[in-house]
Amino acid sequence: MSKVVDARGLVCPQPVVRTREALGSADEIEVLVDNKTARENVSRFASNKGCAVRVEKESGFYRLIITGRAETGEQTREPGEETRNVIILSSELMGPDEELGRVLMRTFLNTMCESESFPWRLVLFNRGVLLALEGEDTAEALANLACLGVDVLVCGTCLDYFKVKECLAAGRVSNMYEIVETMLMATNSATI
Amino acid sequence: MLRLLPLDESREEILVGLETPDDAGIFLLDHKLGLVQTVDFFTPIVDDPFRFGQIASANALSDIYAMGGTPLTAMNIVCFPCTLGMDMLAKILQGGLEKIREAGATLLGGHTVDDEEPKYGLAVTGRVDPDKILKSLGAVPGDLLVLTKPLGTGILSTALKGDFIAEADMDAAVAGMAELNRDASRSALAAGARACTDVTGFGLAGHIMNMLPEHGLACRVYPERLPLYPRTREMADQGMLPAGAFKNRDFLTGSMAFGNKIETFYMDILFDPQTSGGLLIALAPDALDAFYKELGRSEQPEVIGEFFESSARLIEVVK
């Protein structure tokens, strides 16, 4: 049974201060935080201490499971050379049939959330950006992947084209410069 | 927010108003004299009341300097709980007054209200030569970008709140925040700077963005050249980023282009909100020597980037 630090409702730097106290007396702790700032700061602190961090999204908060002195840190924006897998989503459908394609895409993203290892980045462009909009259940899966350390890039030009920039619910707005960089840096990539 | 107001900006005396992302407003009194006005106040970022007063005062005065003006008069703005004792308030005001005097300005008065958390700052009025106004916009492709103070005050003050560092560890940053941007402003004017603004709450990236017009110009920043206060990097790695850094990042991320292998730390420091930061000055390459000569510091501020022509308005961060 690991020690639980409930840092919900606290603003930075308090969640990090509590995490530091707890890590002093336990090897495995769980930290509950309810905002993105605390999630990133606590992850950064623990990774820097050589701990492994796993993030689980609960309803209304994040559960950060921190285990001491593990070999692998949190998956971050700068992983090792061999792990830069990129998945490109250029459509909201998986395959040509519309009805089947919608179901498959939803399952694909949900399954990815459950998988053992995660891609470095997901790149959404053209109609693929529609997956990340408010109200889509795929947006929830994408937000989960983002919490798990996957960098979800959403093409800003495409959001503007479809006039949906305000509705973006998952991932971060990106640009062609970064998309090109991502593809050039990728060790493996798959286009859906 | 200002869009909700029935503003009348049509008066021809308004040289700098609300439409541009400038640091202070300018009202033309006659063809040779412009009035520069600004106001800024905030909660303590260090425990020492005198030093907080100095910082808040230097921060408010900075907006006048960022426009190329000279401060003339200041009014105190104070929120203070009577439970904290008048000694502390006196020290805050003394710190503030010291900086007003250093700026060559005069304190004319002020106003205090009872409030749970202390806040202090100034409303400042200055004068400016209408032909020598420094604005945020005005850089052209090829111009160099100079930053006159180190970065890291948001990260360090968060670390101070969390007791990760002691106030003494922040000495360099406190001295930096309390420093007037007067000499930097004068040197920028003397060297014929094309644009200028100061770095505050939107962080380095946010204020560089204010120097870019809607179309045609972008800025390239060299992260390893960014000047930093001591311990900033260590504290960022320890998770001491203020919430404002993440807000700035979310707001700007679509306009940022990070090159290959830029470390996470540099993505953080670009968005760290600054208190009483330095001036960002756009200079033609052949004006740099004149600027350095005017400023005459033993350690001259670094050229941290350059402007270039680009259809997209963005900040490129490359090694």
Image (tube, coloured by chain):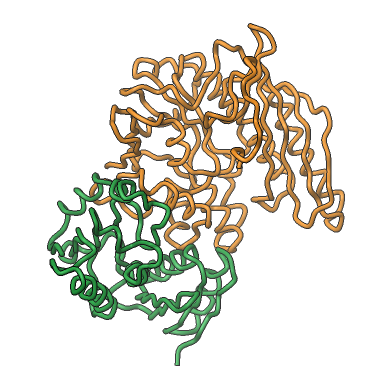
Chain colours: A green, B orange
Q: Name the one closer to the observer, A3 or B233.
A: A3
**Residue B180 to residue B232: above or below:** above
Q: Position of residue B243 (x, y in %)?
A: 52, 57
Residue drawn at the location 58% of the way across and 29% of the way down: B181
Relative placement, left or right, of A29 versus A15 is left
Residue drawn at the location 44% of the way across and 79% of the way down: A58
Quadrant assignment, res B95: top right
Q: Is residue A84 visible?
A: no
Residue drawn at the location 65% of the way across and 26% of the way down: B8
Task: Report the quarter where the C terminus of chain B lies.
Answer: top left
**Residue A170 to residue B205: above or below:** below
**In the orientation shown, which residue stands out farthest toward the top?**
B31
**Residue B234 to residue A104: above or below:** above
Quadrant assignment, res A66: bottom left
Q: Position of residue B233 (x, y in %)?
A: 43, 53
Q: Position of residue B211 (x, y in %)?
A: 44, 30
Q: Name the one closer to the observer, A111 or B77.
A: A111
Q: Name the one closer to the observer, A187 or A2.
A: A187
Task: Report the quarter where the N terminus of chain B lies.
Answer: top right
Q: Is residue B78 visible?
A: yes
The count of marks equals 0
Quadrant assignment, res A2: bottom left
Residue drawn at the location 25% of the way across and 48% of the way down: A178
**Residue A8 to residue B35: above or below:** below
Relative placement, left or right, of B204 versus B12 is left
Relative placement, left or right, of A156 versus A31 is left
Q: Position of residue A156 (x, y in %)?
A: 32, 48
